[in-house]
Image (spheres, helix red, strand yellow):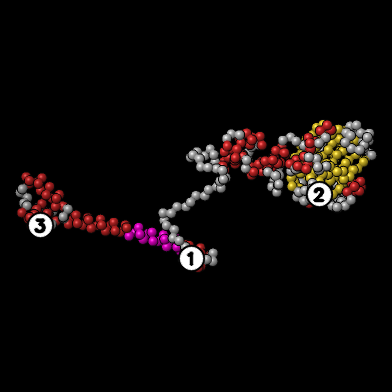
Amino acid sequence: MGLTLSSYYQWLNPFNSNLSVVKEEENGKRGEMLTYYRRRKRGSKIGEVLKFYTRRTKRGCAREKEKEEKEEEEVVRSSCNKRGREEGDGDSVNEERVVKKERTIAPCCSPKASFLSPHSSSNCYDMDLWTEVAKHMDGRELLMLSFTNRWFNRLISEDYIWKYACLRDMGIPAPCPVFFPWKEIYASSFDGSHSFCFRQQDKHMDWMRIGSFYLDSPFVLLTETLSLPRRLPRPGSDVKRSIELTGTCSLNNVRTGIWIADLQLVRCPVCNLETCEGTMQVLDTRHVELFLEEEYLDETWQYEEIGSNRIPVPAAAAIGGIFDLMNLSSPSTAKILNPKSWIGPPTDWQPKAKIGSHAVAVNTNLQPNDGIFVRYQTMKDNNGKVVSIRISQQLI
């Protein structure tokens, strides 16, 4: 722009008089001049300006950072105060602690069993995972898994796993209070045992597991027909007379909870008829905890006959039913009371059974006969609660 190199240096630093003696003619010593320029650059105006703006920029960034942190703390304080005012804790607003920016949220953890200990990073011993897997196993598979090692043995021994398996395999939707461990209840329900295994084994011929149902109330209706009378017997009425007149009776002292129903085929004579030499079918129901009671195992509790009915005319079928009176109008019970939907044609002599959520019934079409004899038996515990019911039919 018309300036020589010496005048340019003079403009950069006018207070340095030594630069005025530098002349353009000494171009041969340009290397020394460049070295001298680099040494003097730090003290030049441009260097001072760059340092000034660098310091100013750093201070500005620090101030902006402090300002942002203060604004975030104010937001946290205002949210805490607002929450305190909404919950009615106005006096404790000033005591709310300030949440710092660098504080992290603690993760949620599932509750662990007391015997569990930390394992490696692999999740092969995750309790929640194996609990979910156990929901798809039956009793035999759960036992096999418990034999794997001590960890699985303790996990499978947890009562809630056997509770789920028991309710699932029984088809009971809701749990109920029990007095024995669910593992023992599962074993006594699915180990293939029935009431004739403990008593009268010489009379027993064959049996079939029908299923499980639930009694919500202690009021139960026993019947030998699926065509219920218009006027049902009242609980507490004369049982024997009710059976003779209507073929039904009501009980008002039955133990509530889960009941298991079996269909038994037994040799005669088990009844009081001396002329019978055939067989009879028995609708055998029991409370789910009966086989765990000591009084039942030592035969302290015995079956008692509460009534009987002799039908001297030919019978088309042998029928027995047990219904929860409080759920007599439920849809599942209505299906049982519709025999055409499940008993089969008259020429089908195979025993049939139907079970619902609160009832169970059996039906066996009979060949030509002279009549049928029906017996009603119950077993009571020490508190007078009925824990087992039998309805048996035999040909005359």
The amino acid type of the residue labelled 3 equals: Asn
Q: Give the overall secondary structure of the magenta segment.
A: helix
Q: Earlier in the sequence, mark 3 or mark 1?
A: 3
The amino acid type of the residue labelled 2 equals: Gly
Q: Mark 3 points at which residue?
A: 16
Q: Distance from label 3 to label 1 (Cα)?
A: 66 Å
Give above or below for 356 relative to 7. Answer: above
Q: Is mark 1 on a helix, strand or loop?
A: loop
Q: Residue 384 carries which label?
A: 2
Asked whether the residues under the numbered discs 2 and 3 touch, taking CB atoms below 8 Å apart as contact, a structural biologist would say no
Q: Reply yes or no: does residue 230 show up in magenta.
A: no
Residue 231 point in image, percent of width and height: 87, 52
**Residue under the image location 5 percent in, 49 percent down:** 25
The amino acid type of the residue labelled 1 equals: Val
Residue 323 point in image, percent of width and height: 80, 46
Q: Which of marks 2 and 1 is nearer the N terminus?
A: 1
Residue 374 point in image, percent of width and height: 88, 40
Q: Reply yes or no: does residue 69 show up in magenta.
A: yes
Asked whether the residues under the numbered discs 3 and 1 touch, taking CB atoms below 8 Å apart as contact, a structural biologist would say no
Q: Residue 93 carries which label?
A: 1
* Disc 2 versus disc 3: nearer the observer: 2
